[in-house]
């Protein structure tokens, strides 16, 4: 089999496929007992990411258990910020950047780095993962989009109001643009590096894009995302994801990416009509549906596939990541329902 013949890649080219390929965002995670065992051995989340054998192991675990059509590297969207000079920590509350960027001086200290030198562990984890994958399984790399990375860098972690981000963005647009330029350069380098180390396709996660109005998205985020899509077009197929972003769907569809991943609050049937063949669509079962019985999960999965109606260019996935307290049997029901079609 040629790498380009993998089911996921054919679907991203919007070719007619025997069924929709299936994988799940956060498919390697705390819901799996084998993941928890590996994390205990590694000593922590960041330790797993930075030790290639652990990162490759947890990337492969859901593939061994369920046989998804794609593996996505176990890493985190924020590792480029650490490589650029920011301190990155993880605790029970999630990721944190204890010294956030709040002024021009801090932004200017941020360095654009060479991933092969500053993040060599990512490349080695990809190579180990590819060696352990079935030939037909695609391997995905990923990164946070520049706006989402800026959100974390300025806020110092997650936020509901993004007050520090908005103050810098609105009051000091010149400094914000310097930051976005650096982040766009780093994201491009990071994604190119992942493809050079074995990734078949790449995913750009713009987690916080939907916190913006459409007008602000087009002004403060979209230009850098669009530039990445153009610059990476000849490198590998690219999928964009923005959660709860139905108000931005037209703009995402117009980016020129190979695929757009839909949040579970969007109608996938309507999205296919709006896409009009411009790109593939990924999604979009509600991750909370996996709290139902395996039989109900299968029923809902079939209903979603019925709504798609066999249209080419569909990648079956959730509308967000797997919740940590999901029953592994329900993930199995989701994957089986896809593979049985």
Image: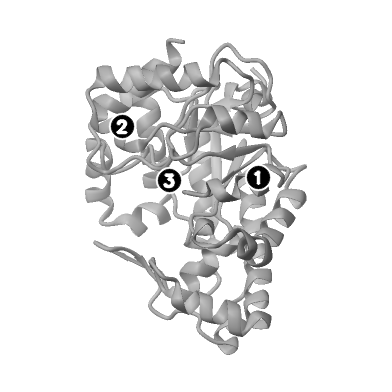
Q: Are marks 1 and 3 in contact (CB under 8 Å)?
A: no
From the image, tell me which residue sits under label 1.
250
From the image, tell me which residue sits under label 2.
289
Which residue occupies 50% across, 80% down?
101
Q: Residues within 10 Å of mark 2 (few under 14, many from 20)?
A: some
Q: Does 165 sit left or right of 260 as displayed?
A: left
Q: Residues within 10 Å of mark 3 (few under 14, many from 20)?
A: many
* Dot label at residue 74: 3
Depicted 214 relative to depicted 338: above or below: below
Which residue occupies 65% across, 80% down?
173
Asked which quadrant contains residue 119, the reply is: bottom right
Task: Name the foreground residue: 55 vs 155.
Answer: 155
Please state, as top left, top right, bottom left or bottom right, where the N terminus lies in the image.
Answer: top right
Disc on the earlier residue, 2 or 1: 1
Which residue occupies 47% across, 34% down?
71
Marks 2 and 1 sit apart, C-alpha to C-alpha, by 27 Å
Q: In this figure, which colouring scheme has been used for the structure?
A: one colour
Which marked residue is nearer to the observer: mark 2 or mark 1?
Answer: 1
Q: Position of residue 183 (x, y in %)?
A: 62, 67
Judged from the image, the secondary structure of the residue bearing numbered disc 1 is helix
Disc on the earlier residue, 3 or 2: 3
Judged from the image, the secondary structure of the residue bearing numbered disc 3 is loop
Q: Does 7 sit left or right of 157 as displayed?
A: right
Q: Position of residue 340 (x, y in %)?
A: 42, 10
Marks 1 and 3 sit apart, C-alpha to C-alpha, by 30 Å
């Amino acid at each position: 089999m040629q790498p380009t013949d993998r089911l996921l890649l054919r679907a991203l080219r919007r070719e007619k496929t025997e069924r929709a390929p299936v994988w799940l965002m956060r498919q390697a995670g705390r819901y799996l007992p084998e993941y928890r065992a590996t994390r205990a051995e590694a000593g922590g989340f960041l330790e797993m990411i930075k030790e290639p054998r652990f990162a490759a192991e947890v990337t492969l675990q859901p593939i061994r258990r369920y046989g998804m059509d794609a593996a996505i590297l176990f890493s985190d969207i924020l590792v480029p910020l650490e490589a650029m000079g920011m301190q990155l920590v993880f605790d029970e509350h999630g990721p944190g950047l204890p010294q956030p960027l709040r002024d021009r001086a801090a932004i200017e200290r941020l360095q654009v780095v060479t991933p092969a030198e500053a993040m060599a562990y990512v490349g080695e984890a990809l190579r180990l993962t590819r060696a352990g994958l079935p030939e037909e399984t695609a391997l995905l790399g990923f990164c946070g989009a520049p706006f989402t990375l800026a959100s974390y860098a300025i806020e110092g972690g997650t936020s509901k109001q993004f007050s520090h981000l908005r103050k810098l963005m609105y009051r000091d647009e010149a400094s914000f643009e310097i930051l976005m330029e650096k982040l766009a350069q780093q994201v491009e380098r990071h994604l190119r590096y992942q493809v050079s180390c074995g990734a078949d396709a790449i995913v750009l996660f713009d987690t916080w894009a939907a916190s913006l109005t459409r007008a602000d998205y087009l002004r403060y985020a979209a230009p850098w995302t669009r530039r990445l899509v153009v610059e990476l077009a000849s490198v590998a197929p690219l999928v964009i994801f923005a959660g709860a972003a139905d108000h931005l769907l037209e703009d995402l569809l117009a980016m020129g990416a190979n695929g757009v991943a839909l949040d579970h609050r969007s109608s996938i049937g309507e999205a296919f009509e709006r896409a009009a063949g411009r790109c593939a669509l990924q999604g979009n079962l509600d991750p909370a549906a996996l709290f139902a019985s395996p039989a109900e999960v299968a029923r809902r999965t079939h209903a979603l596939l019925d709504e798609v109606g066999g249209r080419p260019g569909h990648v079956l996935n959730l509308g967000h990541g797997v919740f940590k307290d999901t029953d592994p049997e329900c993930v199995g029901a989701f994957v089986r329902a896809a593979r049985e079609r």
